Amino acid sequence: MKIDRLIGILSILLQEEKTTAPELAERFEVSRRTINRDIEDLCMAGIPIVTTQGTGGGISIMEGYRMDRTLLTSKDMQMILAGLRSLDSVSGSSYYRQLMEKIKPGSSEFISGRDSVLIDLSSWYRESLAPKMELIQDAIAVNKMLKFSYYSPAGDTKREIEPYYLVFKWSGWYVYGYCLLRQDFRLFKLNRMDTIVHGDAFEKRPEIPLPDLSNEKVFPAKEKVKAVFDPSLKWRLIEEYGVDCYSVLPDGNLLFEHDYSDDEGLISWMLSCRDKVTVIEPKRIRKKLARTASEIAEKYTIHEGDI
């Protein structure tokens, strides 16, 4: 993509005294004419680039501008490369690795030492995730509707959306777009989407609000839960809610108090803690847990003659 190439060219010019159009054309696998247009675009963006002809000539950044080479520090570049590596972990291709290779040759002194940040965004679903992401990115690029089956706690539905963003949040990937069924902007989890196909072309809306991904917006507090946990689950409370989410009782057990957004999610979480937790409030949740536990016990009760 052009923006990636411009970033790569700028990185090389910031790190090398001089380069030439043929060298850049070979490195980025484009024509000299394309490189010349790129240099013009960088100049229009305010980068003072100088080109000289003849023996010893080439392309460079104006000498007085070299005092601002700290535009990107070594740490900045390491973070950029870590981000590019993370995108390769879900893309199913080596596109971003190839982009890194184009940037790094001109930054050998700028990028020193071992990589200290490794990010893998692929989760357990890399095989199914990569083709979905590619299909969605293609639809966003050419303004094509997306049609798919969607599976949620509320039931199975057929959806058609105008896709605008791919979002990574809460350890999962989502697509954000305008849903024709709900007549509003919605987030859809990729792992719950199936049979995704492109639809008709659409015209982008004049105003596309950025998704509000705050926990308060997506998971608004409904009520407060109060529960007593066995000390053996302290690690889990800290991992999921932080060190300030509980207090230690005189008997050593942990009193947990926290807001929650939906009954089913809370019940599922409490059941996953087995007999290591006792819910005190709300009473409604206590009753649902008791009923669910009774139904589970009945399902697995061994009757005479079963053995």
Image (cartoon, rainbow, N blue to C red):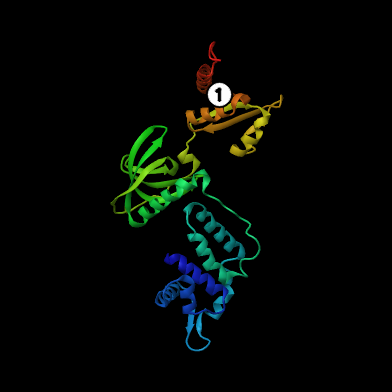
Residue 232 in view (yes/no): yes
Q: Residues within 10 Å of mark 1 (few under 14, many from 20)?
A: some
Q: Return the x and y of residue 251 as percentages of the image width and height.
A: 71, 24
Q: Residue furthest bottom?
A: 55
Residue 47 in view (yes/no): no
Seen in the picture, residue 116 relative to 297 is either above or below; the reply is below
Q: Which amino acid type is marked by label 1?
A: Glu
Residue occupied by mark 1: 281
**Side of 291 where 181 appears, left or right:** left
Seen in the picture, residue 159 relative to 38 is either above or below; the reply is above
Seen in the picture, residue 234 relative to 212 is either above or below; the reply is above
Q: Return the x and y of residue 291 as percentages of the image width and height.
A: 50, 18
- Picture residue at 33% right of the left edge, 57% below the top: 142
Quarter of the figure with the C terminus: top right
- Picture residue at 58% right of the left edge, 24% below the top: 279
- Picture residue at 33% right of the left edge, 39% below the top: 158
Q: Return the x and y of residue 91 as percentages of the image width and height.
A: 47, 54
- Nearest the camera: 197 or 10? 197
Quarter of the figure with the N terminus: bottom left
**Side of 257 where 44 appears, left or right:** left
**Side of 244 where 121 appears, left or right:** left
- Nearest the camera: 223 or 33? 33
Element carrying mark 1: strand
Q: Residue furthest top?
A: 304
Q: Quadrant of residue 278?
A: top right
- Nearest the camera: 227 or 202? 202
Q: Return the x and y of residue 200 as percentages of the image width and height.
A: 28, 50
- Picture residue at 51% right of the left edge, 48% below the top: 122
